[in-house]
Amino acid sequence: MIFVKNPCIRCGKQRIVVKTKRELINGSWVTTTTTRCPDPDCQRIVEKQLKKDNDAREMLISQFKNLNSPFNRRSDIVLGKRKKNI
């Protein structure tokens, strides 16, 4: 176990490095580090929150893709001109 200066987003305890992976991607070395909170209950809550946030992000991305589809273009909407202050 390696300890790094990376506090838990919920309880503030120092997170523990669980796994480190180094791989070559497009000619560059990328290091991915997986960390966990030392408190299992806190980690479970953090994972639940991250999943909730990720699901919401995925939903917004899918809605955005549907809005930009050729069948949903709103190019026929004409916006009115702004009135000038007199």
Image: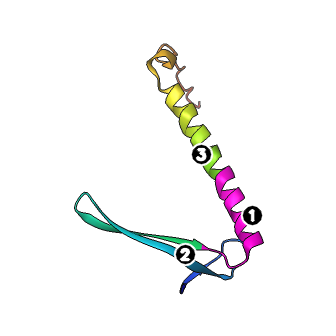
Under circle 1, the secondary element is helix
Rendered image quadrant of residue 9: bottom right
- Colouring used for the render: rainbow
How far apart, in angstroms, are the residues tagged by discs 2 and 1?
18 Å
Query: Nearer the N terminus, badge 3 or badge 1?
Result: 1
Callout 3 amino acid: Arg
Report the amino acid beneath label 2: Val
Q: Which residue is mark 2?
A: 18
Which residue is rendered at x = 57% and y = 26% of the image?
Answer: 83
Is residue 46 on the magenta stretch?
yes
Q: Please provide the residue range marked out in magenta.
A: 36-52
Three-letter amino acid code at the position of disc 1: Ile
Label 1 belongs to which residue? 45
Left/right placement of residue 84 relative to residue 69 reads right
Q: Earlier in the sequence, mark 2 or mark 1?
A: 2
Task: Say which residue appears at 48% left-offset and 13% top-offset.
Answer: 76
Looking at this rendering, what residue extends furthest in the right direction?
Answer: 41
Front: mark 2 or 1: 2
